[in-house]
Amino acid sequence: MFRFAIPEYLYLLLIIPILIGLQWYKNYHRRKKIAMIGDENLVMRLMPQFSKHRQDWKFTLQLLVVVLGIFLLARPQFGSKIETVKRSGVEVIVAMDVSNSMLATDIQPNRLEKSKQIVAKLIDNLADDKVGMIIFAGNAYTQIPITSDFVSAKLFLPSITPSLIPTQGTAIGTAIDMAMSSFGPQEEGAEVSRTIVVITDGENHEDDAIGAAKEAMSKGIIVHVVGMGSPSGAPIPEQNAMSFKKDRNGNTVITKLNENMCADIAKAGGGIYVRADNTNNAQRVIQKSIDQMAKSEVESKVFTDFEEQFQILAFVMFLLLLIELFLSERKRKWMNKLRLFN
């Protein structure tokens, strides 16, 4: 199997069209200067030792060296054999509430930002596990399909805002149902432990979240719940405004953590309920529970012993540089006999 060890360097290939454009402009500018002197064919006859094609050949060789150099930076490798390896892990799907009430600041900096911090720390502590993410308010949407690419998973966190879901509400049951279908079939030969972590304030609860949690439990999927906020509640800041949300009568709306509902969902799902605060205690409790889950071994075939393949590219680069070095822009008598690069 062929791969690049550091494929990010391949983005440098984007400079190739720029270099070609600069070379075209250089040739255009040179032809324009010659045209100012006189007819191009006549001028070239007056300079029999000058080859108008050799500059293009030199540029082509230089361009090939740059391309090969970029490939070298990306470190091409070949896997020499396939091995069957075993990994043990848990599949985790986070269902995060992004309703407007999650902007309340009874947890600092606010409920939503604290939720993101909890998720980021959970991801940091995953090893051979997989993680996915669902966001929900009045509806639920898959934000990150289940993956072992933890770096990409964390990249999505900063962009999560209530504006991603225009329909307000707290459709916890819908989010749990979507999470169950997101796991996919079990891998052959092993039953991987699976869990759903619901992060919500439980307010304006709409659907049968307890029933969804029971169904998940019946399928062997544990449902944990992290409660965001405080029972005493806090006002909801208006987005892009220095005021708080008000009801129809002009009274400031106070959003409160529905702790009983959150605890009932966790109980129905066979998991634990923990209320988040301004410490990392909630994340530690959930992490401990995930770590204690039975981690089944899963066999997978992977290429091993990847060997560097830079030697051939380096040798070709060296030859191209030698050719470019000895290739003059002027014609030489001995080269004229070979009729190369004329």
Image (tube, helix red, strand yellow):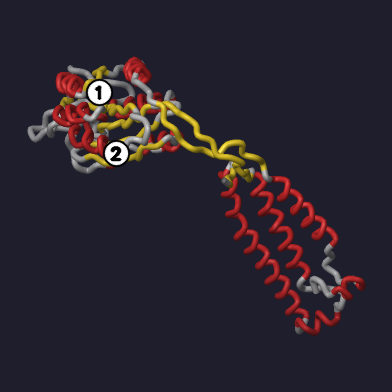
Which residue does the image show at 84% across and 73% down from the upper left? 50
Q: Disc 1 on helix, strand or loop?
A: strand
**Residue depicted at 72% across the width and 49% down the height:** 312
* Quarter placement of the C terminus: bottom right
Q: Amino acid at mark 2?
A: Ser
Q: Is residue 130 left or right of residue 333?
A: left
Query: Is the residue marked by circle 2 packed among few (<14), some (14-19), or many (20+) residues within 10 Å?
Result: some
Q: Position of residue 260 (x, y in %)?
A: 15, 19
Query: Please, is residue 17 above or below residue 79 in the view?
Result: below
Rendering coords of residue 138 (x, y %): 18, 38
- Residue 228, percent across and down? 25, 23
Secondary structure at badge 2 equals helix
Q: Is residue 7 left or right of residue 187?
A: right
How far across and how far down the image is residue 238, in percent? Answer: 24, 34
The residue shown at (58%, 49%) is 10
The one nearer the camera, 298 or 73, is 298
Please name the residue shown 26% across and 35% down the image: 179
Can see residue 173?
A: yes
Taking the image as shown, residue 163 lies to the left or right of residue 292, namely: left
What residue sits right under mark 2 in the picture?
182
**Location of residue 152 by image quarter:** top left
Residue designated by label 1: 225
Q: Is residue 228 visible?
A: no
